[in-house]
């Protein structure tokens, strides 16, 4: 999410569609797990997305999100909301996290040099701070997804963005006192390559890097970097006008705040249909 790449972002936002994208055979392209694609929902088509990430070591953690995407007056504008729910520390803590309301603008489509759809989200402080389910402050998130169909068999996606939390809180300290509030800025960038092995079956390789920070029990801000590599598969099942896309990923997480590698699983399920 780092905006030393602001020049690149401005270029992407201001460049005209110099080259039209070649027409390729149809295939599922908009159902990734960690990387956001730059395709808004088509007019009068709604999508319901469930995504659960599970890690076993050093304790069992499950982070689940439900997202619903809805076009507004056509494909150019899209509204959505995201509700997270987490089971942490081997389910000793669970509950709703900080929800988000999202707006995405279809700047360029797949008929242009690439699809580009900037997103801005409002972070709502709905998670319980003392259970480590939220950070106790409203905030804003910006992401710039770019998607490009490379050939009949490959597509690529790229993300860059940041999250700003102006008055983040930590759980009560070990002495029972609330830590000071802090401004936190998290950065993310990543990309994916999709092998369109069939019209309704894909192999995926996603990479995501988060440059983030948290507040410990002493009220200090600690910075860390997390890198996630995730191979995966997905397929599409069409039942009339309903498309169901299940998917499975295998993330490997490397973080500067923990020793070793965390290995997990991603469970994905999407329902897409006209309304």
Image: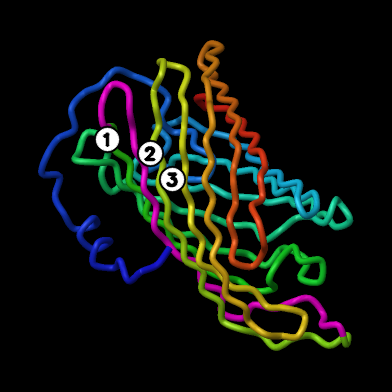
Q: Which residue is mark 3?
A: 78
Q: Which residue is mark 1?
A: 110
The reply to whether dot 1 and dot 2 touch (C-beta < 8 Å) is yes
- For residue 39, which numbered disc appears in the image? 2
Residue 42's place in the image compared with 118, above or below, is above
Q: Nearer the viewer, residue 269 or 46?
A: 269
Return the x and y of residue 245 as percentages of the image width and height. Answer: 56, 25
Magenta stretch: give its range: 150-174
Mark 3 / mark 1, whichever is N-terminal: 3
Circle 3 or circle 1, nearest the eye: 1
SS category of the residue bearing label 1: loop
Left or right: residue 224 compared with residue 157: right
Left or right: residue 144 compared with residue 262: left
Circle 2 or circle 3, nearest the eye: 2
C-alpha distance separating marks 1 and 2: 8 Å
SS category of the residue bearing label 3: strand
């Amino acid at each position: 999410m780092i905006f030393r790449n602001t020049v690149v972002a401005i270029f992407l936002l201001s460049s005209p569609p110099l080259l039209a994208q070649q027409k390729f055979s149809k295939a599922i392209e908009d159902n990734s797990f960690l990387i956001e694609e730059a395709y808004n929902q088509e007019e009068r088509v709604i999508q319901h997305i469930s995504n659960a990430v599970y890690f076993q070591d050093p304790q069992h953690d499950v982070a689940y999100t439900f997202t619903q995407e809805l076009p507004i007056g056509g494909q150019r504008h899209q509204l959505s909301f995201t509700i997270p729910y987490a089971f942490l520390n081997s389910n000793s803590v669970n509950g709703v996290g900080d929800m988000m309301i999202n707006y995405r603008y279809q700047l360029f489509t797949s008929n242009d040099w690439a699809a580009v759809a900037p997103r801005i989200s409002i972070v709502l402080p709905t998670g319980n701070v003392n259970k480590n389910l939220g950070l106790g402050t409203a905030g804003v998130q910006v992401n710039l997804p770019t998607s490009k169909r490379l050939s009949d068999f490959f597509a690529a996606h790229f993300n860059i963005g940041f999250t700003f939390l102006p008055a983040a809180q930590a759980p009560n300290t070990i002495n029972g006192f609330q830590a000071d509030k802090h401004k936190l800025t998290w950065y993310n960038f990543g990309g994916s390559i999709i092998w369109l092995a069939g019209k309704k079956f894909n192999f995926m390789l996603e990479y995501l890097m988060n440059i983030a920070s948290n507040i410990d029990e002493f009220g200090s801000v600690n910075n860390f970097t997390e890198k996630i590599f995730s191979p995966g598969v997905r397929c599409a099942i069409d039942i009339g006008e309903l498309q169901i896309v299940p998917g499975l990923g295998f993330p490997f997480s490397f973080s500067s705040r923990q020793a070793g590698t965390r290995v997990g699983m991603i469970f994905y399920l999407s329902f897409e249909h006209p309304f």
